[in-house]
Amino acid sequence: MTDFFHEGDLVGVLTAQPLDRILDYKAPEGGCMLGAFVEVPLGPRKVLGVVWGAGKGDFDYAKVRHVIRVLDVAPMRSEMRQFLTRAAEYTLTPMSAMLRLATRAPGLGDAPSMRKVFRLGTGTPDRMTDARTKVLEVLRDYGGLSFTLGELAEMAGVTSSVIKGLVKHGAVSEEDAPRDTAYATLDPDYGGKELTADQAAGADVLKHAVASGTYGTTLLKGVTGSGKTEVYLEAVAECLRQGRQALVLLPEIALTSEFITRVEARFGFKPAEWHSGVTMTERRRCWRMVGQGAAGLVVGARSALFLPYRDLGLIVVDEEHDTSYKQEDGVLYNARDMAVLRAHINNAQVVLASATPSLESWANVDAGKYAKLELTSRFGAAVMPKMGAIDMRVEDLPGSRWVSPTLQAAIRARLEKGEQSLLFLNRRGYAPVTICRACGHQIACDHCDARMVEHRFLKRLMCHQCGETKPMPTVCPSCEAEDRLSPVGPGVERMAEEATALFPDARIAVLSSDHFGSARALKEHIAAITRGDADIIIGTQLVAKGHNFPLLTLVGVIDADLGLQGSDLRAAERTFQLMRQVAGRAGRAEAPGEALMQTFQPEHPVIRAILGGDEEAFWTAEAAERKAAGVPPYGRMAGIVLSSPNVQEVFDLGTEMARNDAPLRRIGAQVFGPAPAPIARIRGRHRVRLLVKADKGAPLQAALAAWAAQFKLPSTLRMAIDIDPQSFY
């Protein structure tokens, strides 16, 4: 295949527009490279595209339009085009949607933007003042480096007008400089920590793998607090020594600030960041610099996988078991699996780090596909927390309270010692259900088949499916009885209310994503808790992920049974992981920790496995159950969700699809359904699910594509195909 197209040659351009084909255009004046980012005319509009190959030529050449211009960014590399193609084939996603994921930076078509910078000039001011002296001293101290106006004013402790006055006299020179600048070069030998023998052995294995320049995936398993981060940062250091780029994926934006601080301490400078908490300007800079090879390390959310790396040598997926790596809307993909695909194409290494790995990764280690490294002891003086269950069947607790007397006593003991306690409840808001005590009506969302959750903090009811909110009513919408509406069940806000009543002198902090308008506000709140500005922390699963609170010695799980209900095939696995992760927050410094779980089912196999700490026994039993049922990771699954404002329309199509399943039967697959989805209406659209189950080696994607192609969808109906579904709502 040619890598360069001369002016007038036919080129095939893939655009990010929802079209099902590659479009032919004539190469522009000066020609264009394969993979070039271009601007092309589409109807009356100008749109972004990528030169994907030679044009087909099945169109009157005279009518083919010209590429308008080639954008001033590095062309898309062949391994990136291959990654997008293979990811699209695996997830059954149109290529245009994959390209949208790979071009999610603003202003790619803009000329490089400039900004004013200030450095030491050659002139002399007419008179010196203290303020002027401070500015010139800062510029001299930094050896003539340039600063933005805000940076220089802050460092000198003066107003911007002082600097502008010096510019008039030529003592400070004002220049234009590109806004998108390279990131500081990280130093792999800057701040390495003393590692334990356990950690050093693990780090050596990973460094050797990275230095080999070949593909491989390693599961880095270690109890919470064992120093997995320090171990994989040594692999990052080796990757930087090799002159290649590294990517660390984190499951939650809230974790980034603590992690970036650790990276800066290890390598001397901050890495590039890519997640929804960074500004649009930073996103554009990150996208461009990654493509130029001017960003050695990227720390980001799952979409950072789709950045245009010049030479990717290592991908770390931290907390690899976390469900937030699965994108549940738009393009349905699992970042953990896509990281392995991307690394395979790039001859890079993958490190999957977790204290409680997913059964998928456990099975891949078992099958010999992944290597495994295990860290068995906590770092330094810290020891694993003592685990215990509180049998709620024998606790004397009023109906409107949720903290048992046993847990109350444990919290009081911590308060007396000046230590922190965490109350964990995986329910946002104040109460999950609001019921009328006169007629029994439960307040539901107007657009979804879901109960509205009371958020007393916001003084509103909120639907956690579509985000719809409405004020708290005083009258029942059904029977119009006044003042008979009552909250049922606890959320974190209600737990905070109860904790305030039980411990009036304690400082209480609530950690829930609803309470913070921005990622920055959440980071500041977490930093305050780490400093010891709270005695009792009440949190949702947000607190289970990677935070290190040195003063925290007690974790109380309010409802350990919550995740065990429901038909989700991963319910036991998720409960096990979440409880182990939450328990791992306790005793991460010198003081020993304790984790107490309130449960009505202390004899449940999952609860017993958590308390006993026999992880291998739990995973072996869970694997045997899944194997017997032929479900992932020992079988293949796909979820199909049909949605439409018309309930009859979705059921009719679902029934027709179930009847005409010949392409699936040919590969031995079974279709279950159609059935109403557990949440049968979201945003006014009725939802019907079908589930397809096949053997592990079956060519599922090709069969699904042939099956779906048989049906013509009305414009009001949408079909979403989810390969390897993580949730079944």
Image (cartoon, grey):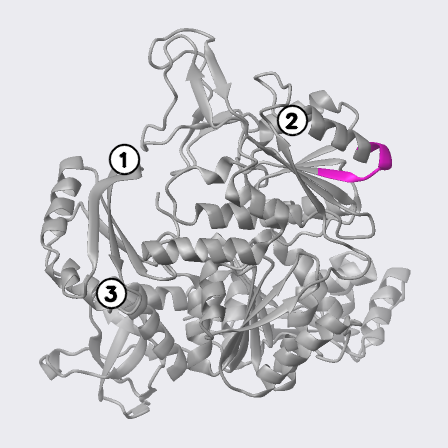
Question: Is disc 1 placed on a helix, strand or loop?
Answer: loop
> In the image, which disc is placed on residue 700?
3
Give the residue drawn at x 36%, y 28%.
445
> In the image, which disc is placed on residue 714?
none
Nearest to N terminus: mark 3 or mark 2: 2
- The residue wearing badge 1 is 684
Nearest to N terminus: mark 1 or mark 3: 1
Q: Determine whether 143 is above or below 616 in the image.
A: below
Nearer mark to the viewer, of 1 and 3: 3
Question: Which kind of residue does numbered mark 2 sit on?
Answer: Val
Cα separation, mark 2 vs mark 1, equals: 38 Å
- The residue wearing badge 2 is 403
- Tell me the quarter of the picture where residue 40 sits: bottom left
Q: Where does the magenta region start and end?
A: 415-421
Give the residue drawn at x 20%, y 45%.
673
Cα separation, mark 1 vs mark 3, equals: 31 Å
Q: Let me know if residue 70 appears in the view.
A: no
- Is 645 in front, or is 48? 645
- Is 189 in front, or is 292? 189
Question: Is disc 2 placed on a helix, strand or loop?
Answer: loop
